[in-house]
Image: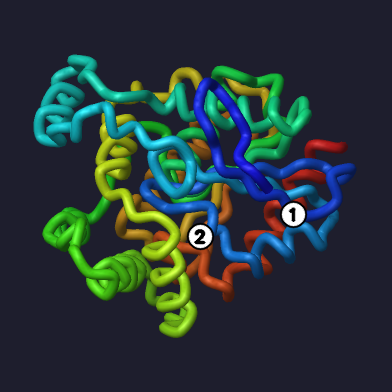
Amino acid sequence: MPQVEANGISIEVETTGDPTDPAVILIMGLGFQLIHWTDGLVNQLAARGFHVIRFDNRDVGLSTWFDDEPDPNMATVWLRSKFGIRPKVAYTLSDMADDTAGVLDALGIEAAHVVGVSMGGMIAQRLAIEHPDRVLSLCSSMSSPGQPVGSVSLTMKLMRMEQDPDSREGRIGVGMETFRLIAGNGFDLDEDHLLEMATAAADRAWHPVGTNRQMAAIMADDDRVPALAGLNVPTTVIHGTDDRLILPKCGRRTADAVPGAELVLIDGMGHEWPEGTWPQILDSITDLVERTAS
């Protein structure tokens, strides 16, 4: 599908399934592209009777990049946010939630079931808070209702990786190593699939500075717990017990914040949705939609 104009920028969008079916919009996480919602998962979701929408967030993939904005000084952003001083950032999670609403506008969809992973879960929460009429149900996965808490050692390993290698092989290697580091211990790593995804991402678009600006938006956001407490939307929170990038307690805190939310913990899942988890995840999304209809 061609790009759509939404919230004043261009956003790359792909849709799967019958447009007359209930809409499910998928919001990807930090630095990842719409292709990281793998075709197999999307096709299975569409086969359950959903019109599935995936898109590149701003500053990644084929959507608008914000290269007129400076590369943020992450130490400064972190310090200001820690001391309650709102840092200057290129854009906010609220802006990214507005992007999502703009995609729905461009597709002529009044409201959708919203699924977000990691940073995408934070954007989905913002969407539900600020555009409640657009959200039929909320599924927040591998995410947090405020600043995420993760393993310091894992975070340091990710930060020490070369983020912008010159060669195609180096970029593929960064993608592969990232996948390996964030995976849980409960599911076998499909190295062939990881190589395919890392290669596709490196060849499609490579923009690590955009990831930095997205991270700054995360760090600049307010704690969402008070606002989540006022939601009146069916909600499911999905988290892996082996997630070390955003610890399971962050998922529990999200579920505790939203009235009536259901918490689904998947044994052995890390910061990922490996194929072995798809039946449970798809069942959880389907059950959530059915709760909305009842």
In this rendering, position of residue 89 left or right of residue 130: left
Is residue 85 visible in the rendered image? The answer is: yes
Q: Which residue is mark 2?
A: 36
Q: Residues within 10 Å of mark 1 (few under 14, many from 20)?
A: some
Q: Secondary structure at mark 1?
A: strand
Q: Residue at x 10, y 28 (%)?
A: 76
Position above or below: 236 against 281: above
Residue 41: % across, % down: 65, 65
Of residues 156 and 254, the one nearer the viewer is: 156
Q: Which mark is residue 63?
A: none
- Residue 163 figure quarter: bottom left
Q: Residue at x 27, y 67 (%)?
A: 171
Is residue 126 visible in the rendered image? The answer is: no
Q: Quadrant of the C terminus?
A: top right
Residue 24: % across, % down: 71, 44
Q: Residue at x 15, y 61 (%)?
A: 162
Of residues 153 and 60, the one nearer the viewer is: 60
Q: Which residue is mark 1?
A: 16
Disc 2 residue type (three-letter): His
In this rendering, position of residue 46 left or right of residue 167: right
Residue 29: % across, % down: 44, 47
Position above or below: 186 against 216: below
Give the mark nearer the N terminus: 2 vs 1.
1
- Residue 192 figure quarter: bottom left
Q: Residue at x 77, y 25 (%)?
A: 110
**Between marks 2 and 1, how big is the CA–CA gap?**
15 Å
In this rendering, position of residue 46 left or right of residue 54: right
Disc 1 residue type (three-letter): Thr
